[in-house]
Image (cartoon, rainbow, N blue to C red):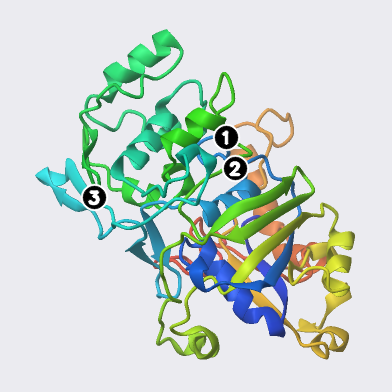
Amino acid sequence: MPSRSCCRRVAQSGWLARVARRAATAALACGLAGVGAAVAADMNKTLRIAFQVAETGFDPQAISDLYSDFVNRHIFDPLYSYDYLARPYKLVPNTAAALPEITDNGLTWTIRIRKGIFFADDPAFGGRRRELIADDYIYAWKRLLDPRVRSPYLFYVEDKFAGADAVMEQAKKAGKLDYDAKIEGMQALDRHTIRLRFKEPDYVLVHNLTQTPMAAVAREVIEKYGAEGNTWTMSNPVGTGPYFLKDWKRANKILLEANPNFREMTFPDSDDPADRAIMSQMKGKRLPAIGRIDISIIEEDNPRLLAFDTGQTDYEKLPYTMTDRALADGKLKPEYANRGINWYRVPEPGLIFAYFNMDDPVIGGYQREKIALRRSMALGFNTEELIRVNFKGRRCPRCSRSHPTCPGTIRTPSRS
């Protein structure tokens, strides 16, 4: 039985950023959301950041770690994204021309892809420009079904589409998927139209279609670079996104460069007063604004903050262990503020539980007195002190499973 109000907390990230590079940071954020236009990128500008955990690789259907996905979101394009300046966030087309056309009581979706979107240049295409087509998405989703790929995101598509069960059964027997086998519920009607047919309505899928495991990949690339046995292309990512992988030294350095084939997009508009400052700098500008993203892997907190202090990186997620070094009384210390550095405090939808061992002879069991003991321990736990000491004041007590910004969230701790 988990304890209650004592152990739910909302993480609050603190980001240190140099004012001079604020526009570049904004452009990166939009790149993560799948928007941007590398045509206008200034190749004399480089955004330098550090990851605290090493990447795995860059095959969107095969990886599952957060830091590899940060990179993949710059390289690959899902059909949909979000308008992150809208309140609340709003689902918007990315490479799709519009939101899905849903008919048949939710059983049939028709998705049209925008024309004139191209992959980054690669030898796999034989020197020709390669346009994004509907089959690229179908091929990517079939990779999730392929037992060789062992995708951690199989659940996105498993047991959902009409006619897929027979193909999956044959794949299990053969040890690999037949990519030329037709699946009734997953078809390209023409070069720019996808039709999905479900076994039953699934309205969660539209949000899964914003994720990189559902992003398009080119069959030519997988067949040229795919590893023997699992077809992974960890070191040869080729997508339609705003950047391509220029250089990679595993667990050390990742260099992304603006994709010259990327389509034209501009910074999203907002009339929210909270966005007035960034709108004054970025409204109407083509994105991304910077030519390169240079990512270093620095696992330890102290060296990572030192890299920021000495100008080797341009922004840094302030570690809790380094809070006292940069902040005093909840404010940025003068030695940072006087150098034109800002601190941005952003709530994160984190959730931490403390669990009781139900097999423990003292606190385990379901007798009324055991339940009462665990409840009294939970209610007596000093959450505020934990936040002050362990997290340097950078957490908030959480009173329900949902994030405080969600409608209906309980904001008053229950003492029952």
The residue drawn where x is 66% and y is 45% is: 374
- Identified by mark 2, the residue type is Phe
Taking depth in this image into account, of 182 and 223 the one nearest to the observer is 223
Q: Pointer 1 and pointer 2: residues touching (CB < 8 Å)?
A: yes
Q: Which residue is mark 1?
A: 233
**Numbered disc in front, either 1 or 3:** 1
User: Measured from the top left, where is residue 29 in percent x and y?
Assistant: 56, 68
Task: Tell me the distance, in whole angstroms, between the alpha carbons under discs 2 and 3.
Answer: 26 Å
The picture quadrant where one finds residue 235 is: top right
The residue drawn where x is 36% and y is 49% is: 131
Mark closer to the chain start, 1 or 3: 3
- Identified by mark 1, the residue type is Thr
User: Measured from the top left, where is residue 150 in percent x and y?
Assistant: 52, 26
Q: Which residue is mark 3?
A: 111
Figure check: 14 above or below 297: below
Residue 173 visible, this orientation: yes
Q: Which residue is mark 2?
A: 58
Q: Quadrant of the C terminus?
A: bottom right
Residue ranking furthest to the left: 104
Residue 375 visible, this orientation: no
Figure check: 318 above or below 174: below
SS for callout 2: loop
SS for callout 1: loop
